[in-house]
Amino acid sequence: MSSRTLYQKLVDTHTVSIVDAEHVLLYADLHIMNEYTSPQAFAGLHEKGLRVRRPHQQMGVVDHVIPTKPVPASSRVIEIMDAAKQAANFARNCTRHGIHLFDVHDPIQGIEHVVAPELGLIRPGMVVLCGDSHTTTYGALGALGFGIGTSEVEHVLATQTLVYRVAQNMRIVVDGLLARGATSKDLVLHIIARIGAQGARGYAVEYMGEAIAALSAEARMTLCNMTVEAGARAALIAPDRTTLDYVRGKVRDLDAATLEAACEAWSRLRSDDDAHFDAEHRFDAQGVAPYVTWGTSPDQAVPIDGRIPEAENGSGLDIATLRKALDYIGLTAGAAIEGTPIDRVFIGSCTNARIEDLRAAADVVRGRKVAPTVRAMVVPGSGMVRDEAEREGTAQILIDAGFEWRQPGCSMCLAMNDDVLAPGERCASTTNRNFEGRQGRDSKTHLMSPAMAAAAAIAGRIVDIRKEFDHD
């Protein structure tokens, strides 16, 4: 058999049948759903008189519309009527088909892409589907994860399979180690800014290199989560000791001998040395500074010590795009991004709401206070993250600094609940998208790492953490 990439191996082991030269019928080990993208799929299923094929391989989480007000989980109430109807309908569908649901009052409830790995449900070699584009997160653990549409959700519910168009293969190698102050969030913003918002379109990306090997499992999740913002259809990192240690610590349904045998098999999941990649990129981690987005797309980002691009340096459509972004965001071409005043800070989302992210923010704000002109909030990625942060004191550090400590949910990442920016408000955000109106009508979003967002909260403006908040 010819040499294969990790991506090709995962597709091969889950191919039920070959449909044509470009498509296969792909088996899904796990299908995750939320209240936002599943209603039409269930409705289609019921219209056809079908039932869910394998309920035990489905998981439901209420996360997009749930409020994050700091009340006990048992007291949470969705007050927005349409959102409440969505959640109630989702609960009825899950009950009807015997699907486990992390509902509004569940103490483990959280963001689907945070909850699933923490429960040990994501393991190397799996195929994981979800009606959410950031399902690429699971590639951090050597699993093939990707988002699907509503009609595809229906197909997976009915058959546990998906008609899947096979992607091309891209390798991204990151040499060296990240410099002081830089994180995996900065690395992925750096990569997206270099290759563009469509730079990986049609590809499954595999990350390799010394910098990737040095990242924690949670940092890898941030990297894989945001690779979709470069247009990638999947992102993968081959399992290594870091992966296996993380999975060992989360899996609860396997006895010790079975788990060790599985780990031995997972450790062999990697691309062959002579496997062919259709495209390759190489980056130097030492050249990655803390990054901040200046525009309305994740690829519109610059190092903190950089300047906002001049529209005249583009050409054709680029000029129009740059001008439109600058008009919306309210900044000046050629100006420094450092020093930009902000009104709000949001630390949360499936990109940066894990315990490691909250610890990074707490390290910055310890003994300091949020600027009086800033409203800052932290929304943990899950009930488990929230509990751990409270047990170890991380939450109290953030609270003492003046951050709002809220309940888990997607929250202001996409403003589908009551966590919304007011028109014109400028937010330092750890989320994954800075599209127009993403966090509220006429809102202005600057993506950055948790440490950078925390520093902005204290300073009241976007700052270079290396200069003003260096603990080394």
Image (spheres, rainbow, N blue to C red):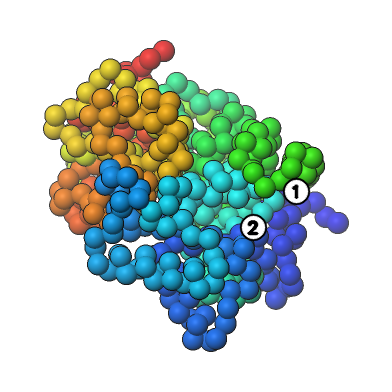
Question: In the rendered view, would you say 379 is above or below 113?
Answer: above
At 47% from the left and 27% from the top, the residue drawn is: 287
Residue 300 seen: no
The residue where tag 1 is placed is: 275
Categorize mark 2 by other alpha carbons within 10 Å: few (<14), some (14-19), many (20+). many
Element marked by disc 2:
strand
Residue most toward the right?
1
Residue most toward the front?
74
Q: Position of residue 241 (x, y in %)?
A: 68, 32
At 69% from the left and 51% from the top, the residue drawn is: 125
Element marked by disc 1:
loop
Residue 419 seen: yes
Residue most toward the top?
472
Q: Nearer the viewer, mark 2 or mark 1?
A: 2
Tell me: 93 left or right of 66.
right
At 63% from the left and 50% from the top, the residue drawn is: 143
Tag 2: amino acid: Val
The residue where tag 2 is placed is: 127
For marks 2 and 1 on the same chain, the one whose residue lies earlier in the sequence: 2
Tag 1: amino acid: Ala
User: Residue 196 got which mark?
Assistant: none
Q: Position of residue 261 (x, y in %)?
A: 80, 42
Tell me: 425 left or right of 199.
left
Q: Position of residue 115 (x, y in %)?
A: 49, 48
